[in-house]
Image (tube, rainbow, N blue to C red):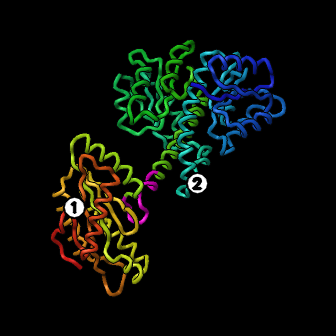
Amino acid sequence: MTARVLVVDDVPPNVKLLEAKLNSEYFDVQTAYNGPEALELISREHPDIILLDVMMPGMNGFEVCRRIKSNPATVHIPVVMVTALDQPSDRIAGLEAGADDFLTKPVQDFALFARVKSLIRLKYMLDELRNREATTTNMGWDESAANDYNKEAPNDAKILIVDEQEHIADRIARVLDVVGDVTLMIGGEDVADRAREKNYDLIIVSLTMRDTDGLRVCSRIRSFDETRNIPILVMVSEGTDKQLLRALDMGVNDYVVRPVDKNEFLVRVKTQLKRKRYADKLWENFHTSMHLATTDAVTGLYNRHYLTNHLDTQLAAAMRYDKILSLMMMDIDHFKNVNDTYGHAAGDKVLKAFSMIIAKNIRGIDLAARYGGEEFVVMMPDTPMDWARSIAERLRKQVEQHPFDVGLDAGPINITVSIGVAASTDQAMPAELLEYADKAMYSAKSTGRNKVIVAEEPVLEGSSS
């Protein structure tokens, strides 16, 4: 794993030492020797992680960290405070300033590389989500989630503690009472399976359990889709560096060393909860943008872009498994007259009602899309031509018999639809299949409308308008 690391320290030998260690692991290292220089470089270069000395003249590391975390453009960049200060109160001050972790001088190699790699993995995930969310924001679909990062930690979180020492877990639960509901599980190899049953915001695992392998629990939590993205905080004992390194390598987010300082512990928990809420918001924005990008705003059906991409996949599958894929192309008859006579608001009501009729008359495996204007397409996997023709005829009758209420004093209006049907062949390409259905649909319109025509076949039964 490579990344751009910024080392900030006012003592050149300290900078050179960290630079040498990181270069040996093939990280791209940048350096700064004071707070203002660091902030200027960060705003220009946007490193992947920052190793920040606390005790610097002029602007100390706490203030630099606060400025990084108060800027929406840099709030997501992980900051690790590097300091000779080792009191819990010092770590709490750094965490409250927004630091993601602490390294105590002299910095041990295993701790340095483990923390850097762990936080960079998280940064890369957030970068991907932020890039997608930025596209969403630029297109006007949703507001940016950047300001959500610095909001207060939630007070309604769901936290799971896995520990065999029930009395210690109870004390921890009382400390965490201010951030939400705490559940205790007394070890057991099935902890991860039980954790899948509830949507937890944080899982705390003791690695000092005797009868339960805490690392195995963490590994299984990371292996299930339902729990893969839940932050994990582990509790370890002094002198268990190898165990901690394994935990961080498998994706554990943070750790505390026993005996646990309750104030530091609470701050670390809040940091994980805030970060998860931020990631959840990015995921929510992403799914919203995906929905908006693939659906038609008026009808709620899929749009043309999604249909054509999905048709490629479905047609390839039909050929692979020797199945038939059928397609219906539909056009609402005389729709321009609806808009011209009653207005575009009435036309939108007709489109919505027509889409609901389509949705009620197709199967769950079928895909309906608005192809453009008053044209619609239904893709029907594993559907022979005669089935597709029957579905199309049923749909035509449903539209013909449906009263379309467009809010007029004179009452509902009548609408009909012309439908073309085509089925895949061994050599059919997506564009060709759409063209066959389109030609059949225009044949239906040119020979009287309100009818179903099958591609390359004569006119089917159906009244004309």
Q: Residue at horizontal 45%, vertical 39%?
A: 158
Q: Quadrant of the N terminus?
A: top right
The residue indicated by pointer 2 is 138
Horizontal side of residue 213 vs 255, given as left or right: left
Amino acid bearing label 2: Asn
Q: Is residue 217 left or right of residue 9?
A: left
347 vs 48, left or right, is left
Please identify the residue farthest to the bottom as the structure is shown: 410
At 30% across and 47% down in the image, what residue appears?
A: 314
How far across and how far down the image is residue 291, in percent?
43, 53
Could you tell me if residue 178 is visible in this image?
no
Circle 2 SS class:
helix
Query: Magenta segment: does it hold 223?
Result: no
Closest to the observer: 435 or 31? 435
Element at badge 1? loop
Q: As displayed, is residue 402 above or below residue 53?
A: below
Residue 260 at x, y percent in the picture: 57, 23
The image position of residue 100, as x and y in percent, is 62, 32
Classify the position of the C terminus by image quarter. bottom left
Q: CA distance from mark 1 to mark 2?
A: 46 Å
Contact between labelled residues 2 and 1, with CB atoms less than 8 Å apart: no
Residue annotated with mark 1? 456
